[in-house]
Amino acid sequence: MNSEINLGIIDASGARDELELLNIKQQRLRDQLVFSNHVTNDGQPRNIKHHTPTDGDPKDYYITIMADGKRIKAVSYDKLIDKLYNYYADGLLDFSVASVFNAALNEKAVTENPKPRTIEKNRGDFKRFISDDFAKKDIRTISEVDLKKFIQEWVTETTPKKKTFLSFKGILNMIFEYAYMHKIIVENPVSYVKNRPYMKSCDTSKAKSEEKIFSPEEIQMLKDEVRRRINSGLKRFGDYYINGYAMLFAIETGVRVGELCALKWEDIHENYIHIHSQQLFQNVDGKKEVYYAPYTKNEKGISEDGRQFPLTNAIASLLGEIKEKQKKLGIESEFIFCNEDGRWIIEEAYTSFLRRLCRSKGLTVTNNHAFRMSLNSNVLIPMGISVADRAAMLGHSIETNLKYYSYAQKDYLEDVKAKLDAMGSTTQGTPGGHPKIVPFAKKESLENLNYQAF
């Protein structure tokens, strides 16, 4: 409205008229929310009484009884409706973006049975994406234009990746959809926001191999360093270097960190490893607590008996070494990767160890997830393992494997150059003159692979 006044579209009188219309619209939304919720079990409107002063009760007020028997009073009918509105809007004391977000998050927590990590991520994303100024705005006054302007300013300033932009938009949609569903606003303006205009300001470049995966030489460097520490006898590494053993196992299997921590000895079978659980955390009374979840990340809270990974000779030898070390030190635990007191290792402790180790070797990639992508790109693809089998072994979909896990190996250009040089060349620059032709693998087509079950 201020913009329209400044541009001369409306004058002060017109602004008053628009403001009056806006107030009328908001009152109608308020009344609609109250009267649709303030009903008895059989759907009949709850009674609102006007109490006239008496000798025993000399006050003038309006009163109604809630479903739980609580009595709500107000000095006027309109103020009573305001109180009921705040009650049915999950106790919103104001209609700021921040207040609506908290109400939406509370409703999600009690009605959708989300994972604790999801709630924590939503809360973190709100702090990360929503500025203090925007968080303080009254959601009822934010127009579609205001919202689009805020989004454009945000993407221009941050130049986010596409995935980050979609998370940002998801938080906005949670807020405005809640306000719309609870009749705080007339419509959800996020539903009119198209992604395409904002993608121009996003970073849509694909990450390079060196930003995502380890090279075979870097993997060997990490393995050598852990073995050096295990055999060093140095007090700071101890006799039981369990985080180092966990890393060696992750290299061979590509397991997620949570799956690594939750793996039990009973999950090891004659020819395979049964990966079907993970370590998760939740906040209880402000404290972070870990718990055992009987499902993997891709199963999304509903166990489908996980997946199987082949028990290779290298993995069997590593597990045997860990078992022998635990037996020697008198360590008893159902978990493979446990501390000396038998308790399972904690995800944060392992990831912190791995980050420090990688940085000590001058590596830019420092996360366990890189082992999953490295196993896929450096080992399974060159071996000719089908994408369906690769996806099954790593525990995700075929599409995910092709889109996010299949990178060219580091230094692949040197490898290709060596092969082309070995073949020789013709005057036209095409390979030739060498009796042994080295074929390149045909690109895997997602359409042709969708039929493959795993």
Image (cartoon, rainbow, N blue to C red):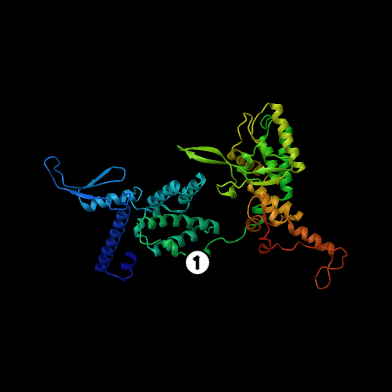
For label 1, the residue is 197
Amino acid type at circle 1 is Pro
Q: Is residue 100 left or right of residue 49?
A: right
In the rendered picture of this protein, how many numbered marks are placed on residues?
Answer: 1
- Give SS at disc 1: helix
Residue 66 pos. (x, y %):
29, 46
Residue 182 pos. (x, y %):
37, 55
Q: Is residue 430 left or right of residue 126?
A: right
Residue 108 pos. (x, y %):
44, 49
Residue found at x 49% / y 60%? 155
Residue placed most toward the observer, 203 or 338 = 338
Instruction: Give the residue furthest to the left.
Output: 55
Q: Is residue 46 left or right of residue 196?
A: left
Q: Is residue 93 visible?
A: no
Crowding at mark 1 (Cα within 10 Å: few <14, some 14-19, many 20+): few
Q: Is residue 268 left or right of residue 51?
A: right
Residue found at x 70% / y 50%? 375
